[in-house]
Amino acid sequence: MSTQALSRDQMRGILAAYSCVFVMTVGLGLTLPLLPILMERMGASATLIGLNTAIGGLALFVTAPLVPWAMRAMGGRKFLNVCFVISALSLAAFPLIPDIAIWFVLRFVLNAGLQGLFVGSEIWINQLAPESHRGRIIGFYGAIATAGFAIGPLLLGLLGTEGPAPFMAAAALMIAGFIPVLAGRTLRAPESHDGTRGVWLALLAVPLLHLAGLIHAAAELGISSFLPLFAIDQGLSEERAIILLTAFGFGNVLLQIPIGWLADRMNRQLVLASACLIAAMCVAALPLAETFAAMLAIAVIAGGTIVGIYTLGLTMIGARFPGAAAASANAAFALAYAGGSILGPMGTGLAMDSFGNNGLPVVICSLTGAYGLVLLMTIRSARRA
């Protein structure tokens, strides 16, 4: 990416957006594997664990349509700083109140704060990215986001799952996230929009495109929540299970910039369909892997292509809805993501309770594979027209 094409104000805004999504994904990356492990120790079933994870998606579903309005009412930087505080306090509260019922409430509040950072940073990145560099800028955004997801489990591996240390480390990172946002003085709140009506109109305008957000969230959160449990049931130790999840996150980081580069040079819908089908094949191969090294390689490719669905969807949303429409379109994409956040963990938890360990690949392969085939059929129909 040539920095000459971007003004100083654009660069500062983009860097602030990058910092928001990094901090937010570290928090999610740590809690997604940690809470299921702790809840299982407390006697929770896979279905109950999936419901708890889905609460995070419910928080996004409730808050996403309100983010553009809140950012305009409060000011962009103040809104993000409030989200940082909410997230930090929620993380600190988990080890202080070891009660599964209370954890449902804390999960909702935590994810409301984290998703405010998520949607706010998406809005800014799409407003600031020029079309000629959009794929690469958003690809780097996706790489930073997934680096956060990878660092979360890595922190968990270093700090362990006992005691308050992992929660407090994540809370400290949230507080550190203030610094680049305060430096981004030129960050602007979303331009005028039609409130929640504008969000639903944007969603209905191109439902197939917004579906990328749902598929990505369902697949990523399903894997992030249950891959450690899947790996342990496959005979791996808890330490190796966390390493496997870290490999999934490493693939997220490794492949986003190449995927963004392809998005700037090829038919973006074709690249999106390819990412979906590759992801489906990788997840299908996971239970067939005979060695830990093979499982790591599969996890890297699966992670990169699953997050590539998000990168490509967000890139196409930004191109389809420029200017004032960007805020509502990004909120609509987040709303679709919220639907996947609810359906993915719930569906995966139910499938694993019903069909055992194979429930994880069955759900993820069905979602990504079906979406990839629909995209290919749409491309073929468009060429015939």
Image (cartoon, rainbow, N blue to C red):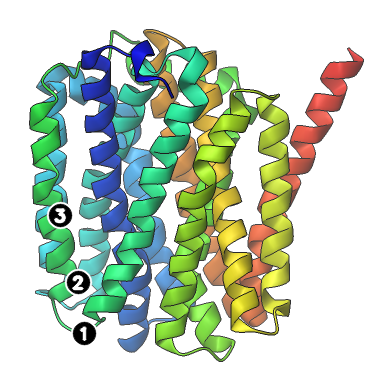
3 vs 1, front mark:
3
Nearest the viewer among 266 and 366 is 266
Mark 3 or 2 closer to N-term? 2
Q: Tell me which residue sits at (55%, 56%) in the image.
A: 303
Q: Is residue 343 visible to us here?
A: no
- Residue of label 3: 173
Horizontal and vertical percent position of residue 116 = 25, 38
What element does badge 2 sit on?
helix
Determine the image quadrant of residue 291.
bottom right
Q: Is residue 263 visible to us here?
A: yes
Nearest the viewer among 236 and 296 is 296
- Residue of label 2: 166
Number of residues whose C-alpha sits closer than 10 Å to that of mark 1, classed few (under 14), some (14–19) or many (20 or more): few
What element does badge 3 sit on?
helix
Mark 3 or 1 closer to N-term? 1
Q: The residue under label 3 is which amino acid type?
A: Leu
Number of residues whose C-alpha sits closer than 10 Å to that of mark 3, classed few (under 14), some (14–19) or many (20 or more): some
Horizontal and vertical percent position of residue 288 = 73, 78
Circle number at residue 162:
1
Q: The residue under label 2 is which amino acid type?
A: Pro
User: Against 79, is 113 above or below?
Assistant: below
User: Against 269, is 193 above or below?
Assistant: above
Image quarter where the N terminus lies is: top left
